[in-house]
Amino acid sequence: MQKNENHNGLRIILGVTGGIAAYKSLDLVRQLRERGAEVQVVMTQSAKTFISPSAFQAVSGRRVRDDLWDEAAEAAMGHIELARWADLVLIAPATANVMGSLAVGLAGDLLTTLVLAAQVPVILAPAMNQAMWANQAVQQNRTLLEGRGIRFLGPAEGEQACGDQGLGRMVEPTDIVQAVFEAPIQVASQSLKGLTTVITAGPTREPIDPVRYITNRSSGKMGFALAAAAQQAGAHVILVSGPVSIDTPPGVDKIEVETAEEMYEAVHLRVKEADLFIACAAVSDYRPVTEANEKLKRKETTLSLELVRSPDTLASVAKLDNGPFTVGFAAETQNVTKNARAKLIKKRLDMIAANRVGPDCGFDQETNSLKVFWKDGDIELEQASKPVIARRLVQLIAECYRSVPSKRSASQDV
């Protein structure tokens, strides 16, 4: 599979906050534009103490935005439109103040408002005194933001403007540009634009009696993260979810189901219109043959339940004529690679994402790692928060989808 090296048209909001490193951001704008990106600079009021907006306007070719209450722009809800315009929000330099504001969800100026309103990847390049960076509060904010999927570049170590030595320098513009365009976590610039994607998530519940059921430990977090990532990449997302306690990502159509049979029916009702199908749900392999009408009483020493196989939604979708590009998941406790490859072949999938699960990994965790396999290759997505892993996987799916001539992508020019 060849990586797409055409980055022309990437729309970047560059947030510049109040630090001496703000002068480096001029070169950052220049290098981003050389790579074909459109750059909209958004400055905080304190940033203007260090560098003039006119300088950024000269190198970006766009009027600098610095005021949430700009009457000319806000007459048409300008900050919302600007948030929708962007493929990426990059803040360089990022001060301790902006990190703290984002950590607690404040929207006190245009830049923090844009970050809260934007449904795209966010990257911070911190710059501050080494003692500030080491402060416990700042590190807690960093951990919190990383857990939400925000990516950090740096800081770098070296001599600082105040004369101190240590971690706190902003990463050099060349390294930031390389990370934006060439690192494994690539910006999904509307890579699924115009495609309909059906995603399953969460567990299923197979009733035993009116109060008991068979289920599993799936939280649904990975499936919901994939739905959010696919929507951010431009897809129309239909999320078929088992019982979970997670808010539906903005812009995603959700269908709630409970049993494996209900999930099978809901998927097949919508999958004929889909270009992609991602089966992330942990569907019960077996269900009770019958459901008791009343609560079963504890009378005998043992209780036997007769189980029957549940319908295999993933395999049935993969067999459809002119069906969608089909991605399965394999949650394994051992032999992850062997079992995943076998499932890929047996079920005739286009791609499979596998991970090890157990008491300390996989289910009910905030992070994940995946081994992804397809016909002509494989890749490992290293441990990261589930939103980050989801964005990586969506980008990989988009690349593979467009490289498979037998699928619907062959007849589409999206």
Image (cartoon, helix red, strand yellow):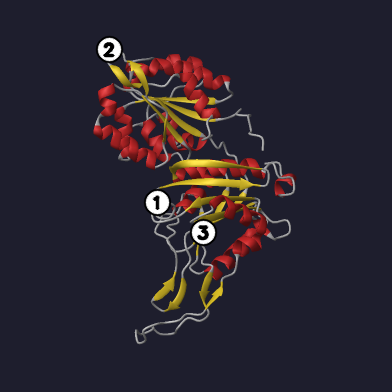
Q: Which is more toward the observer, 414 or 181?
A: 181
The residue positioned 51% from the left and 17% from the top of the image is 30
Q: Which is more toward the observer, 151 or 362?
A: 362
Q: Position of residue 286 (x, y in %)?
A: 53, 71
Amino acid, disc 2: Gly
Q: Cα distance, mark 2 to mark 1? A: 42 Å
Q: Which is more toward the observer, 176 or 105?
A: 176
The residue at which mark 2 appears reads as 163
Give the structural element (helix, strand or loop) at label 1. Answer: loop
Q: Is residue 233 visible?
A: no
- Residue 281 numbered mark, or none: 3
Mark 3 or 1, which is nearer the eye? Answer: 1
Q: Cα distance, mark 3 to mark 1? A: 15 Å
The residue positioned 34% from the left and 84% from the top of the image is 298
The residue positioned 44% from the left and 41% from the top of the image is 384
Give the structural element (helix, strand or loop) at label 2. Answer: loop
Amino acid, disc 1: Gln
The C terminus sits in image quarter: top right
Q: Cα distance, mark 2 to mark 3? A: 54 Å
Q: Say if mark 2 contacts mark 3, CB within 8 Å.
A: no
The residue at which mark 1 appears reads as 365
